[in-house]
Image (spheres, helix red, strand yellow):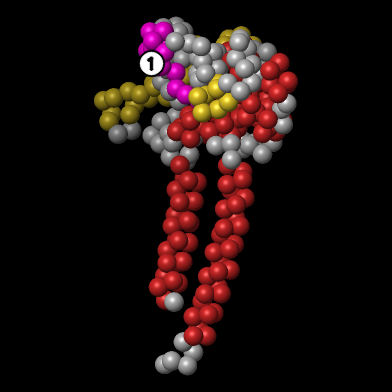
Amino acid sequence: MKRILQTLMSICQATVLVAALGLGANANANEGGFPLDTAPNRVSNNASLQNGAKIFTANCVGCHSAASMRYNRLRDIGLTDQQIKEGYISGDAKVGDLMVSALNPKDAKVAYGKVPPDMSVEARARGADWLYTYFRTFYKDDSRPTGWNNLVYPNVGMPHVLASMQGIRAAKFEERKDPHDSEKVEKVFIRFDQISPGSMTNEEFDSNMGDLVSFLSWMAEPVQLERKRLGIFVLIFLAIFTLLAWRLNKAYWKDIK
């Protein structure tokens, strides 16, 4: 009985440790780099997920595949096959097809220096905060081949495909002495200057990027809400079972001193 109790305690401790590591993953995703903003979590909001899916399929899937996701999985966020076909699929793809880019990987490597990552796993690899800040920190940089740069991912090969929504911005930097080495000078970001407006205000664009990142987070693990719901029941069961096992152990050994 003591061995059973020790095993149960080990399981509970491991569960808490895994949860803590998971919660801390995004916080350290860009340690030492540009500070990350906290992404809104809307994975339980179907309207937000539908808007995020619309932005993704209209602007991203041309270059980025989502090879772990089929279009018909969008049923899970409240869409019908007809809505998916009419509003989320372009070209000859079918509702049951994978979200695969038509861009040839070799051509992509020539154009951008590397093959664009698969977005069905990018939210788990980078973290929602990283993606949310990344989408919102593009700026005009004529020294780059694409004409764009990014604060989170310096010298990024990707152009700002959402510039029509956000508008064109320039980044203002200031040179300061490195606090750790007085002989070195570092560039410190000060602010963005809006060169030309986009179709959205800054608040609208940020909200839409929140929807996009929420969709990417959902797409990386569509069953996450069910997993979390079941996880709560599992923890409750373990707590009750541990209490019963402890009381049973006490009853067995009460007459043995």
Give the residue type at disc 1. Lys
Quadrant in which residue 236 is drawn: bottom right
Please tell me which residue lies in front, 131 or 118. 118
Where residue 72 appears, x then y in whole percent? 64, 26
Please tell me which residue lies in front, 122 or 202. 122
Where residue 229 appears, x then y in whole percent? 62, 50
Quadrant in which residue 43 is drawn: top right
Q: Please give the name of the residue rendered at 59% of the width and 40% of the height, measured from the top-left corner.
A: 223
Where residue 211 appears, x then y in whole percent? 64, 29
For this view, does 249 lie left or right of residue 51?
left
Which segment is the magenta one?
Answer: 105-120
For this view, does 159 lie left or right of residue 94?
left
Q: Do we see residue 204 in this rendering?
A: no
In terms of secondary structure, what is the magenta stretch mainly? helix
Q: Please give the name of the residue rendered at 43% of the width and 39% of the height, measured from the top-left corner.
A: 28
**Residue at image mark 1:** 114
